[in-house]
Amino acid sequence: MSIVEQVRQRATAGEAPQRAPWWRSAVAPVAVLVVLAALPYVSVPLPGVLPGLVNSPGSMQLLALCLVFGGVALSYDLLFGRTGLLSFGHALFVAAGSYTAALALARPGVGLAAAVGIAVVVGVVLPLLVGAVALRVTGIAFAMVTLAFAQAGSILVLRNPGGLTGGEEGLPLDREGLPDLLVGVVNAPYRYWLALAYLALCWGVVAWLVRSRAGHIWAAARENPERVAVLGLSVYRAQLLAVLVAGLLGTLGGVAHLLVVGGATPSLTTSELTLGLLVMVVLGGAGSRWGAVLGGVLYTYLDNRLLELAGSDAVAGLPAVLRVPLSEPTFVLGALFVAVVFFAPGGLVGLVRRRRASP
């Protein structure tokens, strides 16, 4: 048996020896993609769920933001869930994509395609640099090194060197180089489709990599890196590839976030974003594509809707014992996270799987 076959056997231990053809596993994602793509044509009110009709600009904006963070969470799960790397610096890649594209679009004659191309270059070089240094150590030391890189990026943005980053105000999106379809309130559905395309790209890349030789090495290295090394495979190179792909997808997520919200914000540079991504992945289910996307979408939706709920008259009229916690969205999200970790250690997807498996 070849080394690759041994790693594949190690990575798929406990699974059925014969897996379903890849196209069968694609049926459900494609069906969901078709449904989501049709939402801009749905003129149905969902009181209490969305701020207006499903295809209203406000609802499209919220849903687009949820899809963007669903994709970013999927990119983070490639590190944490698939490779077992606890990174506290993923926000650096997201912010790099957002600020790089914003700075490029602010230059005369630079269009969207060129800005995305420049962001892709940054999304390759920066993860390679961070990964090459951080992967020299393991465990909590790796997390601390990635955190140091992210903190350096956050400080750089807030210091606003040469007036490039806008400091605490961030950078507004220069719309001169954008296609007309991505500009204006009435074109919110097109930004929604852009966010959906980004999520689909992340899903496709992760699905392909997980089934590839690299994916089997990641799974084996997550469980027993020493055994992988004994088999003659480089754990360092495999993990560096994971950091590269996750960082590149995160960078593209920053570009998508820039186009959806209309600017680059310093909140993308903070470690709070990475911690939020960790919560998203654990909430949905680490190591699961459905879990990462579900966690990212649900967390972003609640984060936005609970903020609106906190200032509503309904909450203001409640007794203090209910009004105080409900007026703090972070408290509610934290309580939800604790409840999921306690009652569903495998996340929401793990809970569904256990219910299906139970007689």
Image (cartoon, rainbow, N blue to C red):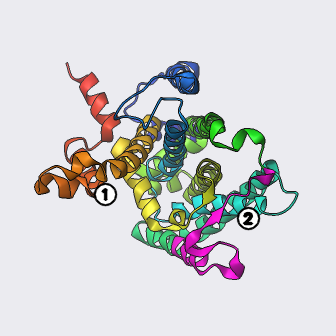
Which residue: 46% across, 60% down?
A: 273
Does any portion of residue 320 appear in the rendered image? yes
Give left or right: position of 306 versus 136: left
Separation of marks 2 and 1 at Cα, in angstroms: 32 Å
> What residue is pinned by disc 2?
103
- Residue range highlighted in magenta: 149-177
In the image, residue 303 sits, relative to residue 162, either above or below, namely above
Which residue: 53% across, 27% down?
A: 36
Residue 93 numbered mark, or none? none
Give left or right: position of 172 versus 70: right
Give left or right: position of 19 versus 116: left
Q: How many marks?
A: 2
Tell me the kind of residue under disc 2.
Leu
Q: Earlier in the sequence, mark 2 or mark 1?
A: 2
Query: Is residue 176 inside the magenta stretch?
Result: yes
- For label 1, the SS is helix
